[in-house]
Image (cartoon, rainbow, N blue to C red):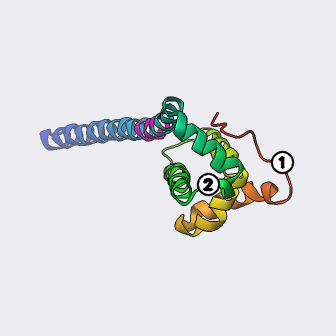
Amino acid sequence: MDLGTIANLIAAAGVIASLLYLSRQIRQNTDAVRASSYQAIVDGNAAFMLTLAQDAALTALFIRGSSVPGDLTSEEQVRFSALLGQIVARFDLALHLHQQHFIDVDVLETFFRMLEDNLKSPGGSAWWRANKRLCSDQFRRFIEPRLAPATQGDPPSKLGRLD
């Protein structure tokens, strides 16, 4: 074997080693993005639950809005709508992250069980009918079949429950 052939073999081995290293780095970066995406959703849920736990008036509004939305004043209706809008937007994001392979299906299912409880309440159901057009098409296609039992006479879930 001449010196040129040996040099080419060494260069090829270096390229292969570089590609293997790059592949490992990309995998680690993907895992970090996946973990960060999950953490962002968990943090958003935790912040919302903490806010409810610390603010008795907001908790009362959330419970009343969920159970008897027609009893809310105009101002309370706007606040309740903003609360549900914030919840739904977070879950719309979670679905998008799942479709990008950043959130596993079992994690997504856990998140969506919480959302379903909120949207199956009388107030949540009314909010959804009035505001679903503001959500992405993919989100509506995903959530509407899951909400269908609520429109077919199932009793509403326990109010204020966020699991």
Does the magenta stretch mainly form a helix, a strand or a loop?
Answer: helix
Query: Residue 65 got which mark?
Result: none
Where residue 11 sits, quadrant-wise, is top left
Quadrant including the C terminus: top right
Looking at the image, the residue that sits furthest to the right is 153
**Circle 1 residues within 10 Å: few <14, some 14–19, many ≥20:** few
Where residue 34 sits, quadrant-wise, is top left
Q: Would residue 143 appear left or right of 9 to someone viewing this image?
A: right
Of residues 40 and 47, which is closer to you in this image?
47
Q: CA distance from mark 2 to mark 1?
A: 21 Å
Residue designated by label 1: 155
State the image coordinates of residue 162 (x, y, percent, origin top left).
Answer: 63, 37
Residue designated by label 2: 72
Circle 1: residue type = Pro
Question: Answer yes or no: do the residues labelled 2 and 1 have beta carbons within 8 Å?
Answer: no
Quadrant including the N terminus: top left
